[in-house]
Image: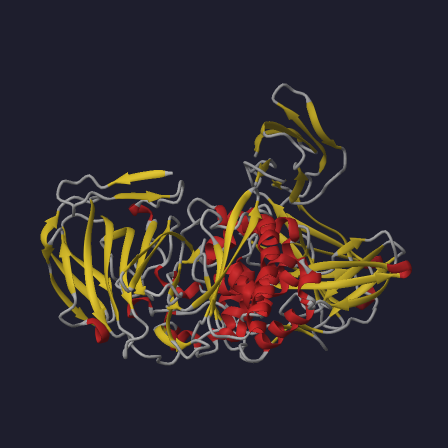
Amino acid sequence: MKVFILALSFLVAPVMVLQAQDGYYHDFDSKRTTGKSGTGDNIDVNYYRCDWTIDPRTTSKTITGTVTTYFTTTTTNVNTIKIDLNSGSFNNSSLVVKYHGTTCTRSLSSNILTITLPVTIATKGTLDSLSISYSGNPPNVSGAAQGYQRGKDGNNINYVNTLSESYEDRDWWPCKADMQDKPDSMDLIVKVPWASSGTDTFWVAANGKMIDSTISGGWRTFHFKTKYPTASYLVGISVARFNRYYRTVNINGTTVPVVYNLLAGKSSSYYTNAVNAMDKINQVIVKFSEKFGDYPFKDEKHGFYDGLLGAGGMEHQTFSAIAPSALTSLGTLTHELMHQWFGDKVTFSTWNDLWLAEGFARYSEALGPELLPAVFGSNPSSIRLGWKNSSKNSYSSVGAWIPNSSMGNSDAIWNTAYGGAVYDRGAMVVSMLRTLLGDDKFFEACRNYLNDPLLAYGSAKTSDLQRHMEAVIGGFSLQEFFDSYVTGNGYPIYTNSNSIQWQAIGSTGIRFGVVGQGRSAGSNVSYYASVLPIRVQGAGGKDTLIVLYDRGTQGVSIGGHGIEYGNSPTPEIYLGWKPTSVTFDPYNMSLVDGSVMAGTVMATHITEFNVTRQNDKDVATLKIEDYNNVKNVSLESSKDGNNFIFSAAMQSGANGTYTTSLLSSGSTYYRAKVVMQGGEIIYSDIRHILRNEESAKASLLNNPVKNTLRIKLASNGRNSVHGYTIMDMSGKTLQRSGAKFSGDLLEVNVESLPRGTHVLQIQCDTGNQTIQFIKE
């Protein structure tokens, strides 16, 4: 535990000790921007002390309080500070700002409180504080904006609760509303009415751990502390007559307090059913901790409280609020639980990336039943089908990422198509990532994302998640995937003329062919990087799921256990048994419109493609199976290996051989394009012809390496690898292969190697080559 002491001589007495969890403190220079309103652009908030008086019995839902903000300056010469606060509710004589006891000049307009300090803070990095006292009646519900509202319990007694997502934190407390600037800790001190007779009256639900409760006359003051960084919209308060229930759950050796606060005055069955449902979630906490890392707030508490207005649930950090109608909904309870990892521990940096929270939380509604079928009793596939259908219909016009033009206020987010897309399309993005990477790598990537020192208990962007997903698969780019489904709209179609074909290869394998891809109406994506889950069955109960990853002209890769590189639209998979039936996405794992594929004979298969330099010409040769179904073959060229153009038609010869030659033009990449009679297109592997002065040496594409060493072979058309040997630095052989390989990319699995520096020796046509690499 780190202790930060405010020892500046001019601070408000008494001197205050700020405490933050080890590893959670974020230096002010790490902040990337300010919130949407632009407040607090010259400070980094370290700590809030919130003192509130709340009496639900009054005729108006008034809140009175003082919020003291401790901050570090991020620029020099700070003399004004801006804070978010509702100008319609609190611009009155009660609004007083003090800086070390001196009243500051202030103005409140357009929900921004501008404070002029009595002195200039000259030095960047100065630790300082100010206090804001205020009182007023927060605004009423307006569309999707809730904020601070009142309801009635079962005895018709008023209660108060808050729901600040998305911009309503400022509606009831002064704060810097910026997910990228979380305070490292908070004290929430709430004074509420208390009956002198000893009968329980009002209790407080709040974030963090209750550390004190004192009664004085007709009032009781509850003191909660959280030492975890908390986004301002995740701060939640409820003052109500609560029946209270206490449990514990063991998370990796830590006993975590579990608390349920349920509104008073309800029937006995109301409490029995709610408590039974919430108790089941304790099993889910354990399972999610196994998959995503320990429950993020295990040193404080987990729990639920009753009475949320305006939504089914809200993931207030450590203590989620639930509507009375949703207390027994395992889906809602699980959803809010998952938010403690995705949304609370790692918050989205701006509202653009809201799907990073809601997509994972929605996905948990199917993950829970998958991990604990006896607890939930629901079908994960059926749940995913609901998301898939809504993403294809109600929310097809938008992506999961919210553009600036559609997030100006809560209505713009929640009462438009984006309000559903961040949930359902977001959940399908998560489903496709898991399907593509496979469980081991997907959950590893999630844990790495959640524990990244730059993100944990901070905030993230979509690119941060993408980076971690790519890292576990050896750097394979997922940019096209994220462009297709996160920022892109619509979905791909594989039916009718755009289809996926299959063919049994003898009695041990299967070959697939992607004929083409259609797009939904209104799509803004030119070609979807598509995750295609395919169930393959055979005699004797043989059953497996194969995942194809269609990347258009780049070909089809094999997913499900990481991603196997490939650029052929006709991938072959060894099964060890003969396939008899194939079903397209039977478990609703992907946002793709497809159909059951009838068995068909594949049109062709490229068996060989080579390009050699002969004098002043580059000569290309292609050999192909089932050549009777070929319409034409052409040679395409590229200078960068990515952007190919037509170079020459290839002429057919005997037995499926096609050739052509053209004048040499220096270093060039080549591939063959095969067009079938039915219109489908097949591409060969890529060959690289070097300039005469270039060598044919190999180079590493990733170093250091974790699992798969990727080697780029600068082939000149003659250079084949006859094997490789991996040795430690003493010369001891650790791994060897004598297999011949001809192509531009060689991949070597080094997962079993010990960590450290190793030597790779490649045996090539042009001689041996030695390269050092580091195994992580």
Residue drawn 31% across and 75% down? 57
Q: Residue 92, position in %: x, y?
A: 15, 72
* Residue lying furthest front: 197
**Residue ID at (44%, 67%):** 242
In this rendering, would 685 be left or right of 150?
Answer: right
Depth check: give the residue in front, 642 or 370.
370
Identify the residue at image location x=62%, y=69%.
591
Q: Quadrant of residue 519?
A: bottom right
Question: 201 or 597, which is in the foreground?
Answer: 201
Asked if 731 appears above or below 343 in the picture, the reply is above
In the rendered image, the vertical position of residue 671 relative to residue 389, given as above or below: above
- Report the residue at 73% width, 30% height from top: 736
Residue 714 lies, in percent from the top left, at: 60, 41
Q: Nearer the viewer, residue 453 or 463?
A: 453
Q: The N terminus appears in which quarter of the rendering?
A: top left
Q: Residue furthest top?
A: 730
- Picture coordinates of residue 515, whole percent (x, y): 71, 68
From the viewer's side, name the closer residue of 579 and 762: 579
570 lies above or below 311: above
Instruction: Kindly tell me whether residue 1 is visible in this rendering.
Output: yes
Q: Judge left or right: residue 764 versus residue 288.
A: right
| Number of numbered labels in the structure image | 0
Residue 456 appears left or right of 41: right
Give residue 495's position: percent from left, percent from top. 71, 75
